[in-house]
Image (tube, helix red, strand yellow):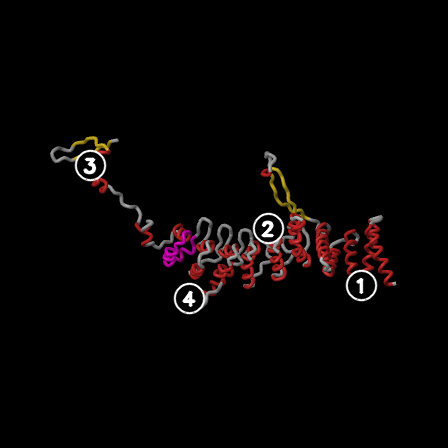
Amino acid sequence: MSKRWKYNDEDSSKTDYQMSVDDKILSSDINNYIQATTVQASYPYHTSVCGSLLYTAPTNTPSDIFSYLRHGNFEAFRRSLDIYHNNIIKIKNDHGQTVLHVLVIHAYQYVWVRLLMMRGCDTCAQDLDGYTAAHYAVERDDVEMLKALTLRFHTQAKPIPEERITAIHEQCLKALSVKNNQGLTAFMLACHHESIKCLNYLNELNINDSNLEDKYGDTCLHYAVARRNESLVEKLINTHRADVNSGNQMRPSALDIFQYNREQQKPTDRRKDEQIEQLLLLNNARNRCTIRRVTSKRKGSIDSEESIISNLACISLDLTANGQIETARSHARMAAALQAKGNLDDAQECYKQAMTFTPDNTIDWATYAFHVAVVHVIHGEERIALELLQKAIAIRKQLEHHSQEIDQLQKAIDKIQAQTS
């Protein structure tokens, strides 16, 4: 390798000749050449790794601000915030998230959240998923962060006018009613993620969205039942007065969801859900749809598990017939469970509920009537029991020529008549 090189000699005129690389390295003039051609840095020194340790210039560039937050460089962030706070509180990243979102997502110290709020950040701002900062706090059940986002500033904490403090607080509470892209408020998201600490705090704020519907028409109780969370179901019904039949009337009810879940469990695991069923039925829960798991095979696929597509389908029930029958059978199943535990009075009430959802000319009605009559006999109410038994046996004789149940009813009738005659 060679290069044309200019060489000056005091004893001769300027001449051109080929100088090898090795010759250049050995030449005493090469160092001067390198120094003379050194390129000056094209960036300020303080932006280098070492220079940034000495000084970081304030900036309102979004990429720089979010980089500071990603890496926890709060010294640089604070220096920028002090000067450019009006710009910084409005910038967003590629996910549509504000600085407040990022602080909450990374669970940084609450003081930064409060500082941004004092600077006038929008606590109602939503990212591309429709989440506010409060949604993210609730999602991981970070109740202390949720408090940082909602607690009113103390009038003596900072020299902020009372009117400004009130405005900030009102905006913070308003953020709790904002729905994300799925139609969930902070309260609804707390139920969806079983964030009980945040749910309790929202209850202290007198926030109750238990009967609000998401974009699909489901409510908090639907989520709780789907999660098989007995304590949450009880809290929603007893504390928040959730309507067990709320939600879009063309979609599955909470009782429909319970029954689907029950069918998916092994018989030995179904006892866990008995209390949930009892809570629903004692509050007059009704069926609307049947949820079925539908499987199909991908076109052109070989016979393997990976080729199976599963989804859920909702089959609407005739609310005047099939829907009421399903509801009646749910009450009857609950009654049988209570009866087995010796809780006869509650069992009787469940059987009565089953009777109200069943036509009074069917075998099912006769069966429920028999169980109700038995409890009446135990309580010494023979006359009421006799009326039920006589109607039950009449129904069965119309629908059955002979059965063990008819014999059982007749014996009970004969026994009561013998005792009262």
- Which disc is residue 158 wearing? 4
Pointers 4 and 1 in contact (C-beta within 8 Å) = no
- Which disc is residue 381 wearing? 1
Name which quarter of the figure residue 108 lies in.
bottom left
- Badge 1 amino acid: Glu
For the residues marked 2 and 3, what is the alpha-carbon distance in whole angstroms? 81 Å
Q: What predominant SS class does the magenta segment belong to? A: helix
Q: Nearer the viewer, mark 4 or mark 1?
A: 1
Q: Nearer the viewer, mark 2 or mark 1?
A: 1
For the residues marked 4 and 2, what is the alpha-carbon distance in whole angstroms? 44 Å
Pointers 3 and 1 in contact (C-beta within 8 Å) = no
- Which disc is residue 27 wearing? 3
Mark 2 sits on what residue?
Answer: 216
Query: x%, y% of residue 283?
Result: 67, 59
Q: Residue at x 83, y 50 (%)?
A: 398
Query: x%, y% of residue 88?
Result: 41, 55
User: Can residue 296 be seen by looking at this rendering?
Assistant: yes
Q: Residues within 10 Å of mark 4 (few under 14, many from 20)?
A: few
Instruction: Confirm whether the magenta stretch covers residue 90.
Output: yes
